[in-house]
Amino acid sequence: MDDGDRRALDLVKELVHRLLSTSPPSSTANSHQSITLNPNPIIPSDQQYHQALRYAIRILSSRMTPSIAADESAMVESIKRRLATQGKSSDALTFADVYTKFSLKTGQGSVRNKWAVLYLLKTVSEDRKIQKHQSTSVAPNGFLSSALSGGLPELVGSESNRNFGLRNDCSKVLNNVQGYTDNSKDSRGLVGKLEKGYSDGSLSDDFQSLNCVGDNSRVLRGKGEVGKGWSGGVLMVSKDPENLRDMAYKEFVNLSKEENEVSEDVLVRDVLYACQGIDGKYVKYDKNEDGYVLPDWMKVPRATRSVVRKLCELGWLFRKVKGYISDSMNQFPAQHVGTVGQAFCAALQDELSEYYKLLAVLEGQAMNPIPLGSESACSGSYMSLRRLSVWFAEPIVKMRLMAVLVDNCKSLKGGAMAGAIHMHAQHGDPLVNDFMKRLLRRVCSPLFEMVRRWVLEGELEDIFAEFFIVSQPVKDESLWREGYRLHAAMLPAFISQSLAKQILRTGKSINFLRVCCDDRGWADAATEAATAVGTTTTRGSLGYGETDALESLVTEAAKRIHKHLLELMHKRYKFKEHCLAIKRYLLLGQGDFVQYLMDIVGPELSEPANTISSFKLATLLESAITSSNAQYDGCDIRARLRVKMMPHKTGDRGWDVFSLEYDAGVPLNTIFTESVMTRYIRVFNFLWKLRRVEHALTGTWKTMKPNCITSHFFSKLPQAVKLQLILTSRKCQVLWDEMNHFVSNLQYYIMFEVLEVSWSNLVKEMELSKDLDDLLAAHEKYLFSILEKSLLGERSQELNKTLFVLFDLILRFRSLADRLYEGINELQSRTSETSTNSRDKVKSRGKSNDKTSEPGSWLGEGRKALTQRAGEFLKNMGNDMDVIGKDYTTIFEGFISQLPVQQHIDLKFLMFRLNFTEFYSQIQPITRGKLF
């Protein structure tokens, strides 16, 4: 041993002697003051001295490279943090003060590599704490017994071998110490720093209980055997060709692991298995707990168990998502899965594929150890439970979202599923928002494809009933009204109700053009609409998040297709002309045609209904058309007008069952449906009866003309009969005037204030219509207005019944008036015959007797009986007139009393027209308050 080795050995001995001879400071109050040695040192035993000396020499002779980067500030903060967490705040302050003085010393005599000194102190302190925890679990006998008790293992061999090993160890101390200092003075400085650190209390206990099996020394497990490369228990690093040092370290690691039930590497592996839905060696799925857990019998720290349970939540979520995907795919193509559900599963599967990639990376990192600086050195696994928690931070957020979506979408499909997923996309977290949008693009792809095909092609390919538009098989005439409807439950939240209705109408228009109109012009309109908004008519041109583009496309397509449809309805199918024809014939707007038809069919309709021939009535209808201005209408319109006999009962006359019908044909029967035509026929029957009543009153007036009763006949009647005739005729005339006033004003109201005004409104609304729905609404409003104003609505049923009773009374009056004037004409003819016969008798008597007869002698017994019968007939007719007049007055009062309470304002104007002169107000003061 040369002089340098001797000086280094002496320096180490002196340092060990000083450390063992000192005691901890007496008080922490003087921790910030200068540190001095105890004046009464404790003399250590020879055994303690030799053990501490050999431990110090082994530490200084170690050449292991640290596994962390050299960062002095980080090391200082780590030491202070450790002292603070252990409840030694005053020690942390003392250490900070000592380190400040230590770091300020520079130049000659100072320590160059300050970080190495700090690292050494921290490592020794940590090894001491580990030794304290392990001392109770390792047997006191064996190779490590003395190391655990005193800090150094027993050296194998004779005393000379011990001395030789000690000399070999000491020969390397100088080289290591010189690596930390500039000269021999630095060695003394190092001793001073170590002494100082011991005396301030921070390292006093660490040096005494330090485990020699640490990072800076490696030993072999054995029973008195020394491996190759060992000399007196000191590993010769430079002479270790068989890597015995690594073997010793691995054996030490394995020994440490045996002290715990399960190592962290095994737990990491099981957690990675659990995150793939696979049971590990220890972490398994528990149905009762509904999650992956560690068994209760396993000795694992509570914190570790909590971390494992938290990490395994990802596996529980994965199990739920994977199970949903498997169940859905196994059931496809079931009705309740659908294409949207399939797209949802595909999107989830893509996300799981990215998740699999992450697990593969993490598993690879868990299987590979961390490489150290030396090529032959190795360390533990890179992956730990704490690092797994960092890696799983983002995947667990996504997996939670997918699990929530899976729970919410189990019983949903189609648009309802897309709407439920869309509601979860309304999130403020950018990560969640981006993830949900990416998912929704895949999920909504089939739905937007259905919208595109419906809006641009009019095709509804909805095999699994997922679309918010539902079709049902109907007749062509009901295709527009009943063929398609909105299914509110399948309407997603990102499509508004108004947009959905516009989508429905656009597709209905295309189907109507294609099926009912046999037209292909809509294809050009759809292409123009797509070009106008900058999209295409191909698959995939629309997607989630492009609601504005969808709305623009639907608006443009609807505008062009509806315009094309309305032009087709007005120009090719002449919708307005057919509405006018219905108004002229079914609503009796063509006056000359109606009058001529009523004249020629009147005799036929007076017969019993079961004896009337519909073929004969059809012939009479054709004759009425050719004899009026209706002949100038087109052949297409005239051919659509037909006679229809309504169902009749026993005792019905032809007037009760006669009707006209108008066959609109395809595609106009979409507007003029059976229900609509039934209401038109109802209006026709009402107007036809009104015209019949008017026609009857006109016929009565012709019978009542003054020239029907000659003044000669009137002057020849007896005075009593003459007065009775005047009274009866006057009653008939007054009652006719009252009835004619009512019928004329009612007819004027119906024909002008109802039909003409409603027609004018219909024409205006037809010009403003933007689609077929608007046209249907305008026509429906037109027909509804006619029914309500004509007392045919549901709210005017009682008034309508009263009105028809008045019509029946007027027809009874017509029959009574006809009987009256037939009787008067018969009386006139019989009186003339009687007068002629009387004159002949007088002449014959004059020839035989020259005496002249007295005035009035021409009246004989026959004339007297005739006069008596005439008086009785006129009296009876007068009584019948009184009965009809009284019934008519009573019912008419009830009729006009109901007009003010009608909800439709035009019916109030009818009352104003009927009582324009306030006649009924004056003759009925009692009911005036009710009427006005």
Image (tube, rainbow, N blue to C red):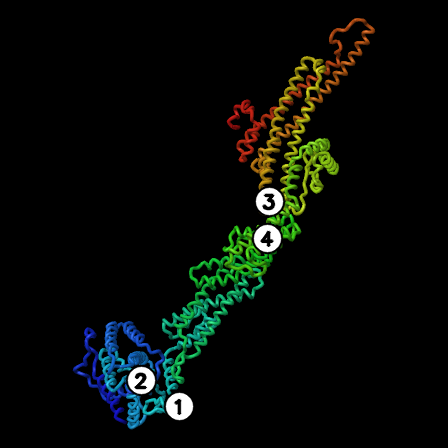
Q: Which residue is mark 1?
A: 241
Crowding at dot 2, Cα within 10 Å, few <14 / some 14-19 / many 20+, comes out as: many
Q: Which residue is mark 2?
A: 212
Q: Is residue 80 left or right of residue 425?
A: left
Q: Earlier in the sequence, mark 2 or mark 1?
A: 2
How far apart are the alpha carbons under marks 4 and 2?
Answer: 86 Å
Q: Earlier in the sequence, mark 2 or mark 3?
A: 2
Q: Which residue is mark 3?
A: 776
What residue is rendered at 48% in x and 58% in y?
422
From this viewpoint, is residue 491 visible? yes
Give the percent coordinates (x, y) of residue 485. Answer: 57, 51
Circle 2/circle 1 CB separation < 8 Å: no
> Helix, strand or loop at disc 2?
loop
Q: Residue 829 occupies which quadrant of the picture?
A: top right
How far apart are the alpha carbons under marks 4 and 1?
Answer: 85 Å
Q: Earlier in the sequence, mark 1 or mark 3?
A: 1
How far apart are the alpha carbons under marks 2 and 1?
Answer: 23 Å
Q: Earlier in the sequence, mark 4 or mark 3?
A: 4
Residue type for callout 4: Gly
Residue 318, which numbered label?
Answer: none
Crowding at dot 4, Cα within 10 Å, few <14 / some 14-19 / many 20+, comes out as: many
Farthest residue, direction left: 39
In the displayed structure, 456 sits above or below 313; it is above
Circle 4/circle 1 CB separation < 8 Å: no
Q: Nearer the viewer, mark 2 or mark 1?
A: 1
> Helix, strand or loop at disc 3?
helix
How far apart are the alpha carbons under marks 4 and 3?
Answer: 17 Å
Q: Which residue is mark 4?
A: 507
